Image (cartoon, rainbow, N blue to C red):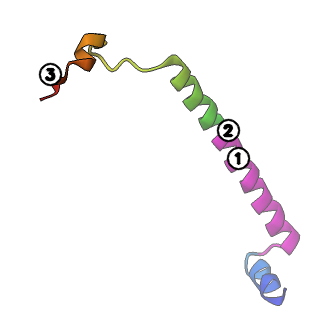
């Protein structure tokens, strides 16, 4: 606890002030994570156009074409 008081004093704040700042950072990081997650899930829901064309079933099962 003494080391913590020394760190707080070197930052011109209190232990509770340091704790409040850290909790605020945790909340902010969580909010950024949730926003990024919503965007990523929306992108996945929309899908991506990678070009090309769908393969026909016969092409997928043609063993000669795989060689």
At a point 33% along the width and 21% down the height, the residue shown is 50
Magenta stretch, residue numbers: 12-33
Q: Which residue is mark 1?
A: 30
Disc nearest the viewer among 2 and 3:
3
Majority SS type along the magenta span: helix
Specify which label sits upstream in the sequence, 1 or 3.
Answer: 1
At a point 72% along the width and 55% down the height, the residue shown is 25
Relative horizontal placement of residue 66, taking residue 58 as reference (left or right): left
Relative horizontal placement of residue 49, taking residue 42 as reference (left or right): left
Where in the figure is residue 32, as x and y percent of width and height?
Answer: 65, 42
Disc nearest the viewer among 1 and 3:
3
- Secondary structure at badge 3 equals helix
Disc 2 and disc 3 in contact, CB within 8 angstroms: no
Query: In the image shown, does 10 or 43 lie closer to the viewer?
Result: 43
Q: Which residue is mark 3?
A: 65
Q: Which residue is mark 2?
A: 34
């Amino acid at each position: 606890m003494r080391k913590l008081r020394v760190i707080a004093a070197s930052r011109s704040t209190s232990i509770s002030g340091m704790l409040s700042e850290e909790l605020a950072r945790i909340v902010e990081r969580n909010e950024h994570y949730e926003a990024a997650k919503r965007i990523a899930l929306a992108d996945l829901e929309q899908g991506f156009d990678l070009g090309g064309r769908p393969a026909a079933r016969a092409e997928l099962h043609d063993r000669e074409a795989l060689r």
